[in-house]
Image: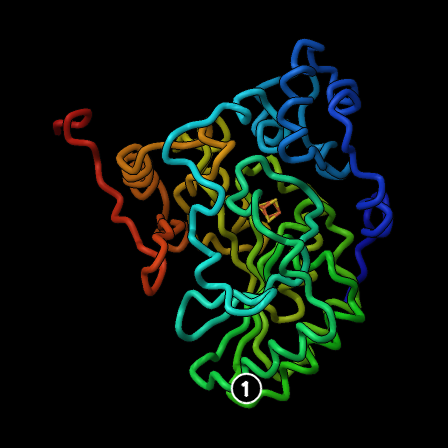
């Protein structure tokens, strides 16, 4: 396989270590007005700022409304309480029988491999998640393996987080090796934003671990805007697909970031050009501190209906919402708001 060089290859661990975490530094790097600093500091006190340089470089300087900036910049609005927005909007605490294991749907379990992320997304529905109580040490891992052995109905394991790819390759390899021994497991899914934020995370060792297991691996990225996809992200995506690992994307509908047909259309087309299939477009989960990103279900369905008219079916992400307690994600049918579109 051709090794395409990154323009600036730095290890993902170095990039993680050097991520920007100081609001003043972020504003300075991006030549943004100083009057954003106070709000950024207050938001940062609730959920810390974190953005690595490879992602920072894709944000346009001097634009406080840049759609990538809005995903990472702490804001004063995060400090304002809004009724209906909670710390655990998906009621995951009720589906958390063991540390590090969430079992919401009958046939698949989600493992919280790491509380760390490469980037702190302001709208994250797990921004208040009890990662401290869900750390996976050796004892917890053995408990999880025992749980999986006792649940033959589970055929898929999802590595999630935080970001599961914040876990070192050697540990991931060991975990996959353990899971392979459970005969009823068929698939291993990785939910990650790390290859988007730091593309050098796609290492040869990771690709080997995912492509050489008997489990069928698939990777689901999290990209909300086409500007997040640069040459390095495309290269990382190609490495994944060249290893015959299906590559999908899920995104969240966010006010001010990607709530227009034009932005969604460009996102779907850019994903596909990078070898990534649009999978889900989620309604925002009502998490405390991020209400300013929310859109109504009616607005979402209206946008999706217009988008559907613009795209071939294979580029149309499924508009969906997660409703706590339901047996699966709930698909929403795109529909025009007839009051706005009487035709
Ligand atoms: S990378 Fe994913 S888990 Fe981490 S903050 Fe962003 S949305 Fe949340």
Q: How many marks?
A: 1
Q: Position of residue 20 (x, y in %)?
A: 78, 33
Q: Nearer the viewer, residue 254 or 261?
A: 254
SS assignment at label 1: helix
66 up-or-down from 122: above or below: above
Q: Nearer the viewer, residue 23 or 278?
A: 23
Question: Which residue is under mark 1?
Answer: 149
Q: Is mark 1 within 8 Å of ligand 1?
A: no
Q: Is residue 341 left or right of residue 325?
A: left
Q: Position of residue 102 (x, y in %)?
A: 51, 65
- The residue located at (67%, 15%) in the rendering is 38
Question: On the rendered image, what quadrant is the N terminus found in?
Answer: bottom right
Q: Is residue 101 left or right of residue 30?
A: left
Q: Quadrant of residue 143?
A: bottom right
22 up-or-down from 7: above or below: above
Q: Is residue 76 left or right of residue 307?
A: right
Question: On the rendered image, what quadrant is the C terminus found in?
Answer: top left
251 up-or-down from 209: above or below: above
Q: Is residue 215 left or right of residue 37?
A: left
Q: Position of residue 139 (x, y in %)?
A: 71, 75
Q: Nearer the viewer, residue 93 or 302?
A: 93
Q: Quadrant of residue 236?
A: bottom right
Q: Residues within 10 Å of mark 1 (few under 14, many from 20)?
A: some
- The residue located at (57%, 20%) in the rendering is 76
Q: How is the image coloured?
A: rainbow
- The residue located at (46%, 27%) in the rendering is 81
């Amino acid at each position: 396989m051709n090794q395409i060089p990154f323009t600036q290859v730095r290890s993902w661990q170095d990039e993680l270590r050097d991520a920007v975490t100081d609001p003043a530094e972020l504003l300075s790097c991006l030549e943004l007005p100083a009057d954003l600093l106070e709000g950024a500091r207050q938001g940062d006190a609730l959920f810390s700022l974190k953005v690595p340089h490879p992602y920072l470089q894709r944000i346009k300087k001097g634009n406080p409304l840049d759609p990538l900036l809005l995903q990472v910049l702490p804001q004063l609005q995060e400090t304002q309480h809004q009724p209906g927005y909670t710390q655990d909007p998906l009621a995951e605490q009720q589906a958390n029988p063991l540390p590090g294991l969430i079992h919401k749907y009958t046939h698949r379990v989600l493992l919280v491999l790491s509380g760390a992320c490469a980037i702190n997304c302001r709208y994250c529905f797990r921004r208040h998640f009890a990662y401290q109580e869900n750390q996976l040490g050796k004892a917890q891992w053995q408990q999880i393996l025992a749980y999986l052995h006792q649940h033959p109905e589970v055929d898929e394991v999802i590595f999630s987080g935080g970001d599961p790819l914040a876990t070192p390759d050697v540990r991931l390899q060991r975990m996959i090796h353990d899971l392979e021994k459970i005969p009823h497991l068929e698939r291993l899914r990785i939910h990650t934003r790390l290859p988007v934020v730091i593309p050098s995370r796609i290492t040869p060792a990771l690709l080997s671990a995912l492509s050489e297991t008997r489990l069928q691996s698939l990777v689901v990225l999290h990209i909300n805007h086409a500007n997040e996809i640069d040459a390095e992200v495309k290269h990382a995506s190609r490495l994944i697909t060249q290893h015959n690992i299906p590559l999908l994307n899920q995104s969240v509908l966010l006010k001010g970031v990607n709530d227009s047909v034009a932005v969604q259309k460009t996102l779907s087309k850019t994903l596909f050009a990078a070898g990534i299939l649009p999978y889900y477009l989620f309604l925002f989960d009502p998490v405390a501190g991020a209400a300013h990103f929310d859109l109504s279900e009616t607005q979402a369905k209206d946008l999706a209906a217009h988008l559907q008219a613009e795209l071939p079916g294979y580029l149309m992400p499924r508009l969906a919402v997660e409703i706590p307690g339901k047996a699966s994600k709930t698909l929403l049918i795109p529909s025009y708001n007839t009051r706005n579109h009487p035709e």
